[in-house]
Amino acid sequence: MRAIGLMSGTSMDGVDVALIETDGEAVFWRGPALTFPFDGATRALLAGAVEDARGVNARTDRPGRLAAAEARITDLNAQAVEALVASLRLAPSDIAVVGFHGQTVIHRPDARLTVQLGLGAALARRLGIAVVADMRAADVAAGGQGAPLVPAYHRALARGLDGPRPLAVLNVGGVSNVTYLDGEDDPVACDTGPGNALLDDFLLARAGLAYDDGGAIAARGSVDTGAVARVIADPFFAAPPPKSLDRNEFREIAKTRLGLDALSLEDGAATLTALTAASVAAIVPLLPAPPRRWIVAGGGARNATLRAMLAARLGAEVLMADEVGWSSDALEAEAFAFLAVRALKGLALTFPATTGAPRPLTGGAVFRP
């Protein structure tokens, strides 16, 4: 089946759209992918929606700016699909399904609450293609963490990959998550801690910058190792998988324990980057065995300073996804195409060792045009 996946992650920097062919078990072809960055007004609207989401008590609540943000995110995702389909000279009938992640604005699995903004029915009508959306809700309702969702796709890709095992696939978005694969059992997965979100927010507030391009700012700074250790002492990092985080979970903790207000731009960037690396290293003792190879994807994969810090702390080979023939930028969009096909077939999206679900669970709401 030809499937398109859409991802707008917790970094809130844009929409990724990708095309694959899959039966929901194997990946036969990984096609083109496109990225559409958000403009400043959209980023501001989404940031406001995240703030307003603190008042959400039910999945259907849309206080404050949430309704406007939901309409905007749906329109931008529709534009992304339309652009990809047009660039390939395809018709809607050539695509079996679209996997629509939406925009996460609150994730509180302890309260059985997770909200991904996005109007699945409206997207299906506009595109003339079936849409699978709301893929986290069933897992959270059953008592799972609802995240990460991509391990099933990592497992499918890894089956065609030579190299040492165990293997870890690390996605560094706004939040970082890891998938542990040993080639035998179901994947083990969890969120590891802050990814790009704290660093991006710090740079935006201090210098009006969206992100640290290549890690150049952090490379000029000095890490406050004591401050990083104070944050890593938080009980979250000692908790075993599965576990997950809201984008802003560590915002106040990091600000106070890192003393960001007293740090220069460069030292703050270096210290926040080191926090991401340290949080990833903290998961290693909690995995079934130390991974022998790490494959890094997401926006953080392009941060050379972060990759160097990871290599130093992990004591294992650290590669960008592109170096093994995958896509650092499109991996999660591809994953949601894969998961949409699995949802159509009633196959499991989540597993006890990835989200803490009571059993392998399918999920997603299907909308027909």
Image: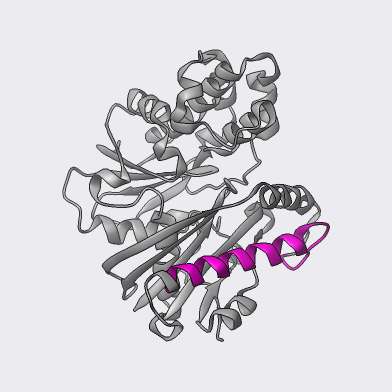
Q: Position of residue 36 (x, y in %)?
A: 52, 56
Front-most of 60 and 66?
Answer: 66
- State the residue at coordinates (78%, 63%): 62
Evaluate whether residue 139 shows in this view.
no
In the rendered view, would you say 330 is above or below 275?
A: below
Left or right, 144 with reference to 52: left
Q: Identify the image's colour scheme: rainbow, by chain, secondary structure or one colour.
A: one colour
* Residue 314 located within the stretch drawn in magenta: no
In the rendered view, would you say 244 is above or below 220?
A: below
Front-most of 302 and 115?
Answer: 302
Q: Which residues are magenta?
A: 59-85
Q: Residue furthest left?
A: 162
Figure label count? 0
In the rendered view, would you say 248 is above or below 148?
A: above
Front-most of 220 and 106?
Answer: 220
- State the residue at coordinates (59%, 45%): 245
Q: Quadrant of the N terminus?
A: bottom left
Q: Position of residue 368 (x, y in %)?
A: 55, 86
Q: Quadrant of the C terminus?
A: bottom right
Q: Position of residue 29 (x, y in %)?
A: 27, 67
Q: Position of residue 59 (x, y in %)?
A: 71, 65
Evaluate whether residue 44 shows in this view.
yes
* Residue 62 located within the stretch drawn in magenta: yes
- State the residue at coordinates (56%, 16%): 267
Q: Where, by quadrant of the figure, is residue 302 drawn?
A: top left
In the rendered view, would you say 277 is above or below 82?
A: above
- State the residue at coordinates (45%, 19%): 219
Query: Is the stretch drawn in magenta largely helix, strand or loop?
Result: helix
Q: Where, by quadrant of the figure, is residue 306 drawn?
A: top left
Front-most of 49 and 211?
Answer: 211
